[in-house]
Image (spheres, rainbow, N blue to C red):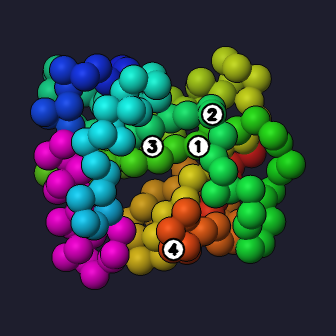
Amino acid sequence: MNIRLATKDDMPKMMPLFEAASRGLREMGVNQWQNGYPQPELIANDIANGVSYLLEDNGEIIGTAVISFAGEPTYNYIEGKWLTDEEAFVVIHRQTIRPDRRGQRLSDLFFGYAEQLCRERGVRSMRIDTHEGNLPMQRAVERYGFVRCGVIYLDNGDPRLAYEKPL
């Protein structure tokens, strides 16, 4: 398995992953990634900004995630407290694994890759957020060593559980 940057040519293979994730969340009763989110324009922007990564197995795309060092404005206010006061941190967004490959701890590969990028850049904090009903993601981030720090709010006001892993 390998992780690489996504290109615009990958979009047709990426969008079904997001659609499957949306369906899965809806089936769990979780109102996350609904109503067309993430939009193709957002994914295209992630790719253009060089923050969209793919997990491949024998050349087949089985997962995707955004790994960004550009900051996250919605993390400026938290009900709770971040573990560190680091101004520079990596944020992981829009992570999903193909449904038939879930349960194999493949999210750990993205977390490990993000951690490696942090160490290469001298960044000492990883942050992520998820919906309170997204129990599989909560288990994945906690298993990897992220600690729940509180609640952040998206631009539309929706709350998300906020996690941090100091490095």
> In screen coordinates, is 109 left or right of 11?
right
Q: Nearer the viewer, residue 47 or 102?
A: 47
First in residue order: circle 3 vs circle 2: 2
Of label 4 and label 1, which has the lower sequence position? 1
Q: Which residue is mark 4?
A: 158
Residue sitting at x 77%, y 72%: 80
> Which segment is the magenta one?
15-32
Q: Categorize mark 2 by other alpha carbons within 10 Å: few (<14), some (14-19), many (20+).
A: few
Q: What's the amino acid at mark 4?
A: Asp
- Quadrant, the C terminus: top right
First in sequence, mark 1 or 2: give its number.
Answer: 2
Badge 3 amino acid: Asp
Q: Which labelled disc corresponds to residue 70?
A: 2
Tag of residue 108: 3
Q: What whole-number distance in Å separates the C-alpha atoms at marks 2 and 4?
A: 22 Å
Give the number of the mark in front: 4 or 1: 4
Between the C-alphas of marks 4 and 3, the distance is 26 Å
The picture quadrant where one finds residue 124 is: top right
Q: Main secondary structure of the magenta part?
A: helix
Residue situated in front as seen by the camera: 41 or 151: 41
Q: Are the two marked residues, 1 and 2, in contact with CB atoms closer than 8 angstroms?
A: yes
